[in-house]
Image (spheres, rainbow, N blue to C red):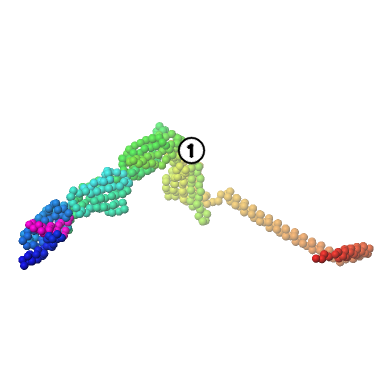
Amino acid sequence: MFPYLLVSVLLGSCYCSKEGSMTLGRPELFGPSVALLNDVGVFNCHLTIYPKNETILLELFKEGNRNKLLGFYTSSDGQAASFPIVIQTFHEGNLECVARAQNNSLLEPSVSYTHNLKVIEPVAGAKVNIQSGASEFFEGRTLELRCTLTAGNYVSYKWLVNGQPVLQSPRHNVANDQLIINRTTSANSGLYMCVATNSYNTTRGFTSNSSEVEITVKDVVSNPDISFNVMKKESNDYFAVVTCQSTRGTLPITFSLYNKTELAFSMTAEERKVKFKVPLVLDRHLTLQCQANNSDEVAYSRWLPLQVVSVGGPVVMHYDFDIEQNYAVIGLRFYCKATKGTHPRFQWFLNQTLLQDRGKFYYVVNQPPDQSILLLSVGSSSAGTYYCEVADIFDNTTAISSNKQYIDKKELNELPIPVVAVVFGCFTFLVVLVSACCFVGVLSRRRKSGEDSLVSQMMETFSANEDELDMSEYTEDNDVVRSARRDDLDWVSETSADDALFMDEPTDEH
């Protein structure tokens, strides 16, 4: 009876192995699923049915690593094991409890189901590292930043530039601890920092801010514009002030001026505009180009032909006008042009008074080097004598005047005497021509009427005379008539003989 009871007790807490040995029942392991680094975590393990008179050793291990014991407890009276441990990062993962009998080799050890532990390590030591290279570079390259930590897990990252969040975009790729900006421009320059955060049980949060890293994206210099002004020294020497200017580009910029392939001047400046003083010889042709450089790439201006020709005459002035529906002249356009000159300066005069760019009744439109136009409203205040003068813009000591033209509204709207004479002459010619045509027509009609009357009289006379003719004059000679009739008969006889001959011919029979 006693052996039976012993076996029944043992079966309640163990089972038989294949070799006939007994195995302890499966222990239960429970404890926190999330723990903070360096906190003390308590894990419990116990057997639901404890074998009597057996001392059970309960051990705590990391799954797959039985060489490192995390905790142990010896239970002789069925008490549950308690494992207080200081949480470290290597504790994270699946934990298991192993139960074994200390003094009974017939009892095989048993293992609990695994218990997963998540260890939260507060973030610390955030730092921005530039993965793409230097912190200062030219636009177009890719910027790659990474946020590194000295400690921390389960971390969320946020990127800031100049204190503002960096948002995801086609050019901005924000991926956890990494920030990638493609095709950078100078707008991407600024102070970058990363903010790393994690939390424990939503009750305790941890944050680590990196120090700011300055990123400078430099603009490549733009293609410069080139222009020039011609000036004259007191010694009658001429020179051109050539301006090279770029609209963008990180300073400093090196500007170079070339005459075709020959380097004329070079200058490095802390501004985007420089000026070069180039000596000139009149009528000599130069071809200039500006080059700008602040990186590995060189920007080029257009080629600028530079030739200085003095103004020469004659200076010609002419005009045309605008009229209303009633053919009254309401506006004039004067044109002033010199025969030669590459840099002319035009001036307009009314009664020897210089006209500025704009007045109450006029407006000056300069179109150098070709011409200047004076737009004029015709009225009482605009009457007077007009002319223009042309001089070199770099030398106003000599000016060439055009012909003078007097303008008055009344005279403009009067027809000139030659025009009146031509119109009157044309009108008179048309009247004479029409009158002549009418006179010739009348004469022709009268002549035709006279001829018709004469013909009628002749026909009447002829009819009267015909009735009085002597019919004896038209009597035929009897001998003549008789001879004619004989000839007719002879022709008939010959014809009959021929017909007879034709009829006597034999007919072909088939």
Magenta stretch bounds? 91-114
The structure residue drawn at horizontal position 31% and vertical position 40%, both measured from the top left corner, is 252
Residue 135 lies, in percent from the top left, at: 26, 44
Is 81 left, or right, of 348 in this rendering? left
Identify the image quadrant of residue 498: bottom right
In the rendered image, which residue does mark 1 sit on? 312
The vertical placement of 231 against 79, above or below, is above
Identify the image quadrant of residue 76: bottom left
Locate the N terminus and report the quarter of the image it occupies: bottom left
Amino acid type at mark 1: Gly
Locate the C terminus and report the quarter of the image it occupies: bottom right
Residue 370 seen in this snapshot: yes
Count of picture labels: 1
Residue 104 sits inside the magenta stretch: yes
The structure residue drawn at horizontal position 38% and vertical position 41%, both measured from the top left corner, is 300
403 or 8: which is nearer to us?
8
Residue 118 lies, in percent from the top left, at: 17, 56
Residue 25 seen in this snapshot: no
Residue 100 sits inside the magenta stretch: yes
The vertical placement of 282 against 361, above or below, is above
91 or 170: which is nearer to us?
91
